[in-house]
Image (cartoon, rainbow, N blue to C red):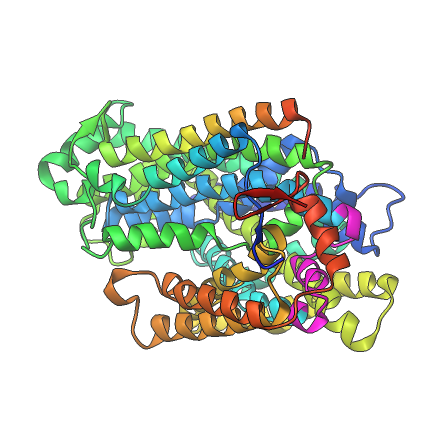
Amino acid sequence: MRRLLVLPTTRAGWGLLIAFVALIVMGTWPVIGWVNRATLVLGLPLMVVWSYLVIFACVAVMVVGNHIVERDNHE
Amino acid sequence: MNSVWPLSITLAYVAIVMMIGLRARHKGANMNSLEEWGVAGRSMGPVMLYLLIAAGSVSAYTFMGAPGWAYSKGVAVFYVATYLAYLALIAWYFGPKVWQFGAEFGHVTQASAIADRYQSPALGALAALVMAVGSIAYAVLQTIGSAYILFVMSGGLIPVWLGVVLVLACIAVYLYASGQRAIGRTNAFQGMLMLMVAWAVGMWAVHSATGGLSFAGVFERIQAEHPEFLTLPGASGDMSYSFWTTSIIISMLSFMPPVWTQWMSASSARTIRRSATWLPTYYVVILPMVVVGFIGIFSLPELVRADTVALEYAMQQLPVVLVGLLGAGTLAASMSSSEPFIHSVSLSLSKDVIQPLLKLSNAMTGRLARLMIVPIMALVIAPLAIAEPGSLVMILLVGLGFASQVLPAFIGMFFWPRASRLGVMAGIVAGFLVTVAFTTLWSHPLGIHAGFWGLMINLPVFIGVSLITPATNADVVERFFRIAAPRGLTHLGKASR
């Protein structure tokens, strides 16, 4: 039992895990350092635009996740 | 402020919330049952759950603290919006499993799930007690915010002590009467009110500051005059990349008990996933209030208290009706955040500490949980909110730091069947001591969040001690992992069951 772990068991599951990790990476260092500039995009600071991009990307990934979970019919 | 409008609007809001809260109970429902008072009979639909979690997570910080951070630090404030979105990911993955645990095993609190998984009422009681420290500190801070709003809106007629009594009495009445259903309904109303008020105040402030309705005018001026507000580490120089990153990770991994209870109040596992999916969209509520903070940088350069920037600006530049709505919105934010914490502490102390200690029946525990809100408010929250001890923020930081140290208990619940009771306890204690030391004695060494340092010690201790101490009874582990891993566990790359 000591080496048993819960990990994704399907390709779609692994894809979702990778997408979740990518979202976390997008909002933290070092990626956040690449957008840390005093420039404006659409009238808003780049950091603000990037933060909301990450926020809405979270929604997109979860929408895809819902399709996968419901298609595979497991909770 | 001479107009009666701000106070009238704010008090009208309080009256509406009281009415909604009192009417929230279902006819014929047994409010003395833990299932009904504690988790609303597991009945909440996706829209209600969306607004419940959204309004609960948007505290007075959004209307006072966030504009204050924008005013004093700049874009560093957006770490909050980012971690709130990540909390939705957490809710999406863990929420449905927590709901199934609750529905199948009868849990109504986070600590009961911990006690059940590790077959240890002592570990459940420990988790309930220490989580209560952070929860009460949080509720006290929100109550102080509420009383401050009533003080300002009444032009000083309602002193802070009276504001504290009024707000807590109001919450106590509908919380006692309708429990989690009252929190759901009032948060739904408060959530919509906050969204409307934030955008109305933000757009009006932008118009009064720039003559237009675009945020661009505000940020072009900031870019020209104070570009340091547009990047990290921010104008005050204290939000390094490491602190931004570790603060987000620690906040994301802090499974606060009220959120757990909210998940268990859903009508189904699918409901939680649907709500969590759209939850990040609510955090557009933060943007307009933050813009008001940025306007304050050039409009109110001499402000003494940064967190009053939105209120000060509103009182100087906005119509009295909007000032009143801002008061109501801020009060909504603080009340919607404090009531789930008060409810959760009452529920958990009754269910996870007093019930096992005194061997009470479930019926007796249900009655006790309802009544317990009164002493918690009257003897703990009210005196602390009126006294405003200087160490309160420190208590909150340590409390929240602890919340993330409970992570091993959840790793053992969702990912690793071998996690043992002693491993979890050892990890929590080691992580907690490190977090306390790096919060109080040596604050956030190397610009890394104290809770993150705690986890770096906590996790190896948890794994090491788990491997050398007895695992939980196999039947219990199998019961939990049938839900946590419906397709089986993985044995170093091989599918296994």
| Image quarter in which the C terminus of chain A is found | top right
Q: Position of residue B215 (x, y in %)?
A: 26, 28
Pick the front one: B457 or B90: B457
First to last magenta residue range: B103-124
Q: Residue furthest front?
A: B494
Residue visible at 60% across and 46% down in the picture: B14
Q: Is residue B265 above or below residue B106?
A: above
Q: Is residue B416 magenta?
A: no
| Image quarter in which the N terminus of chain A is found | bottom right
Pick the front one: B423 or B215: B423
Residue visible at 21% across and 42% down in the picture: A33
Q: Position of residue B64 (x, y in %)?
A: 38, 49
Q: Secondary structure of the magenta portion, mostly?
A: helix
Q: Is residue B113 magenta?
A: yes
For the question of whether residue B71 can be seen, the reply is yes
Left or right of B452, for residue B344: right
Q: Position of residue B293 (x, y in %)?
A: 29, 43
